[in-house]
């Protein structure tokens, strides 16, 4: 059996949206669903102390959280095999490790509404930066519900090294039977602007052509039976993809991974920005350098 979709669950509304979304995806992909709660409750309270105080232990609370999430997932996807785990460790480390045997990691955002929910929590950001499998952050809805795809398209942000992200986007579009929108952003360097009337527009045309060539090269192996829309758009990639995310069910971007032992965040500015502000769920697909 293929590896499961793994969801980080902490009882928040955003994590419940992630459970809904992942249950739908697990059913679509025909894979199991694994719900994981990880926290350091053992460090801050012992089971004996909780018992003496007449309060439920941290583990009991965590078990209630994952079991409630499992019941929710079963109502949504009755045929999906579901397992749960409660892990007494840092959630970032636990989820990155879980990702080594996962089809994808699915996470929620931070906050319970309003401005707080526009920004990504540190756990989701760290996992997206270091996991060895695709990480999907469920964005776009703020009413404790994850809805089925309404836009009918997958959006792919095409970078300079997007092989894994492209393959992932093909698979997601194929599974859903929807078109793939592949977007390559481009910008004209400021030093190439000119006021000469005979050269007006020439730098712009050259940079746009280069973007189109990159797009064609990346998509040269696109499935013949898939509807693929190729678009080159002038502007910063972050702004271009955020605008396009309003018309997509899933935004796919690549994230180049450094060699093992590299210190520091492994997300580029584009992935970092869309994870914080996209209007739809975002899949960050690791690309090996």
Image (tube, rainbow, N blue to C red):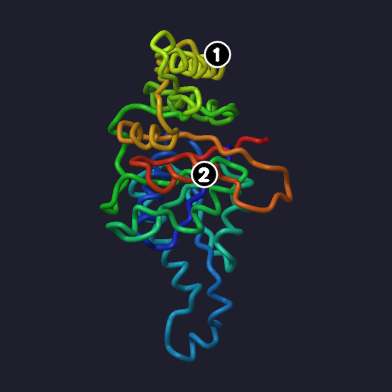
Which tag, 1 or 2, sits closer to the chain's start? 2
Horizontally, residue 252 falls left or right of residue 259, namely: left
- According to the picture, the residue beneath numbered tag 1 turns out to be 220
- Considering the numbered disc 2 on the image, is that residue within a helix, a strand or a loop? strand
* Above or below, 209 relative to 14: above
* Above or below, 45 relative to 176: below
Q: Give the percent coordinates (x, y) of residue 270.
A: 48, 39
Q: Residues within 10 Å of mark 1 (few under 14, many from 20)?
A: few
Residue at image coords 52%, 30%:
168
Quarter location, residue 289: top right
Residue at image coords 44%, 19%:
194
- Considering the numbered disc 1 on the image, is that residue within a helix, a strand or a loop? loop
Q: Nearer the viewer, residue 173 or 200?
A: 200
Q: Residues within 10 Å of mark 2 (few under 14, many from 20)?
A: many
Q: Give the percent coordinates (x, y) of residue 44.
A: 54, 80
In the picture, the disc for residue 135 is 2
Distance from disc 1 to disc 2, alpha carbons, whole Å, reads 25 Å
Q: Give the percent coordinates (x, y) of residue 214.
A: 54, 18
Q: Nearer the viewer, residue 116 or 17?
A: 116
Q: Give the percent coordinates (x, y) of residue 171.
A: 49, 26
Q: Nearer the viewer, residue 171 or 254?
A: 254
Which label lies toward us, 1 or 2?
Answer: 1
Dividing the image into 4 quarters, which one contains the N terminus? top right
Quarter location, residue 288: top right
């Amino acid at each position: 059996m293929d590896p499961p979709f793994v969801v980080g669950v902490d009882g928040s509304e955003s994590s419940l949206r992630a459970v809904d979304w992942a249950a739908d995806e697990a059913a679509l992909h025909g894979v199991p669903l694994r719900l994981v709660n990880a926290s350091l409750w053992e460090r801050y309270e012992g089971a004996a102390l909780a018992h003496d105080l007449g309060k439920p232990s941290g583990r009991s609370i965590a078990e209630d959280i994952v079991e409630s999430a499992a019941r929710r997932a079963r109502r949504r996807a009755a045929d999906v095999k579901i397992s749960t785990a409660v892990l007494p460790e840092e959630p970032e480390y636990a989820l990155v490790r879980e990702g080594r045997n996962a089809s994808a990691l699915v996470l929620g955002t931070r906050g319970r509404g309003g401005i707080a929910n526009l920004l990504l929590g540190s756990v989701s950001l760290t996992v997206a930066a270091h996991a060895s499998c695709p990480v999907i952050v469920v964005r776009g809805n703020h009413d404790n519900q994850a809805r089925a795809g309404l836009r009918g398209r997958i959006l792919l942000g095409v970078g300079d090294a997007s092989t894994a992200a492209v393959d992932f986007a093909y698979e997601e579009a194929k599974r859903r039977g929807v078109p793939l929108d592949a977007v390559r952003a481009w910008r004209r360097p400021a030093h190439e602007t000119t006021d000469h009337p005979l050269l007006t527009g020439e730098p712009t045309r050259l940079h746009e052509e280069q973007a189109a060539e990159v797009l064609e090269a990346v998509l040269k192996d696109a499935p013949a039976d898939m509807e693929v829309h190729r678009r080159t758009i002038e502007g910063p990639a972050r702004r271009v993809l955020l605008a396009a995310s309003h018309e997509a069910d899933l935004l796919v971007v690549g994230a180049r991974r450094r060699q093992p032992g590299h210190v520091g965040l492994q997300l580029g500015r584009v992935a970092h920005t869309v994870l914080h502000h996209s209007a739809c769920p975002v899949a960050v697909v690791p690309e090996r350098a």
